[in-house]
Image (cartoon, rainbow, N blue to C red):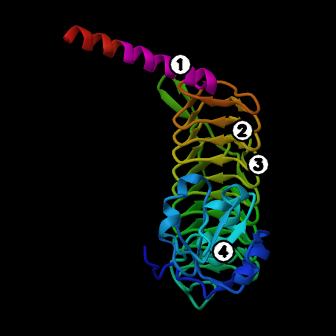
Amino acid sequence: MEHNHFFPPHEGIALASIAAHVGAELLDQGAGDRMIRSVAPVNRARKGDICYILSRRSKEELKTCEASAIICDKALRSLIPDHIPVLLSSAPAMTFAMVGGLLFPSGLRPIEMVDEAEAISPAAFVDSSARLEPDVRIEPMAVIGADVEIGSGSHIGAGAVIGRGVRIGRNCTIAAGATVQVALIGNNVIIHNGARIGQDGFGYAPGPRGMIKIVQVGRVIIQDHVEIGANTTIDRGTMDDTVIGEGTKIDNLVQIGHNVRIGRHCGIVSQVGIAGSTRIGDGVMLGGAAGVNGHITIGDGAQIAAMSGVLSDVPPGGRYGGVPARPMKDYLREVAEMLSRTDSRNKEKEGKND
């Protein structure tokens, strides 16, 4: 892939400076003045690129690699061709992520729609009662409602709508087309394009003439350093708050119901659905398209496999999978038994046909 105008190569950072910044060990000190301008996968990395490897499966790709540096751990050092400088790291993926952010800081946040000279576009609507700290940027067609507060360094994208009374902290990015209402948002939060924050929770009481809407008067609380993917929806609480804990990362197309409380530093992958009033602990990982029942608790550090259906509580540290979700060892044993029975039946059929 050739470089494009969306993310042009960096002017260059010396390899020694990169090593110092990320805390990696540069084995060849003589290569410290090599300039690194971009990142690339191993198989097509060229001069000026930096890449990384995590396993011996990259051995064949290294034959065509011409990178200016490779990040790896000590166990894989022997695989690297002699002409490529090595940055040793005990956590190569994390180190590579840090290098990428250093080279492409604009790639860490949603792409800006316009490059306005004015911080607040004349094509945006900002209510006269809104309170904006210095260095807030608001793009065209954004709407900032009454009594909104936005902290310094925050950026509101084109067409975004910030509802009455919302509080947004410092150095946040609310991307184009997102809507935020009935919400308090911390610092360094990223909300991607088209996300919907703070709308009604799904609450109805059945009656003799149909469903009667239950009022939703809670809020959404989003703590510091949270990232929320495109077209994800987070409902406000019924009477309590919906809370997203510090450092949690949420992928695109996730649905989070009313009164859900998610802990700190969780990872929630695309198409997960979390029903109302569920409690999710710290450091929980939810695989893609998993469904989580309402009014249950998932303990700290638990891991839920993709496409699982979680119907009841999961203990701290539990590794669960399947529908209904059960301990992973039980799930995998059942799958193996099922495959074995299927294989036996197929062999029986083949024998009869013979």
Mark 1: few/some/many CA within 10 Å (<14, 14-19, 20+)? few
Which residue sits furthest top?
352
In the picture of the structure, the residue carrying the numbered disc 3 is 264
Residue 334 in picture, x, y percent from top left: 53, 18
Q: Is residue 107 left or right of residue 21?
A: left
Q: Nearer the viewer, residue 352 or 267?
A: 352
Amino acid type, residue under disc 2 in the picture: Ile
Q: Looking at numbered disc 4 in the image, what kind of residue is underneath it?
A: Pro
In the picture of the structure, the residue carrying the numbered disc 2 is: 280
Residue 334, disc: 1
Do tag 2 and tag 4 residues touch (Cβ < 8 Å)? no
The residue beneath circle 4 is 85
Q: Rounded to the nearest whole Å, what is the CA distance between mark 4 and mark 3?
A: 37 Å
In terms of secondary structure, where does tag 3 sit? loop
At mark 2, the secondary structure is: strand
In the picture, which quadrant includes the N terminus?
bottom left
* Earlier-in-chain disc, 2 versus 3: 3
Q: CA distance from mark 4 to mark 1?
A: 48 Å
Measured Cα–Cα span from mark 2 to mark 4: 43 Å
Mark 4 lies on a secondary structure that is loop
Disc nearest the viewer among 1 and 3: 1
- Badge 1 or badge 2: first in the primary sequence: 2
Q: Which mark is residue 74?
A: none
**Range drawn in magenta:** 324-344
The amino acid on which the numbered mark 3 sits, given as a three-letter code, is: Arg
Does the residue at mark 4 contact the one at mark 3 (Cβ under 8 Å)? no
Q: Residues within 10 Å of mark 3 (few under 14, many from 20)?
A: many
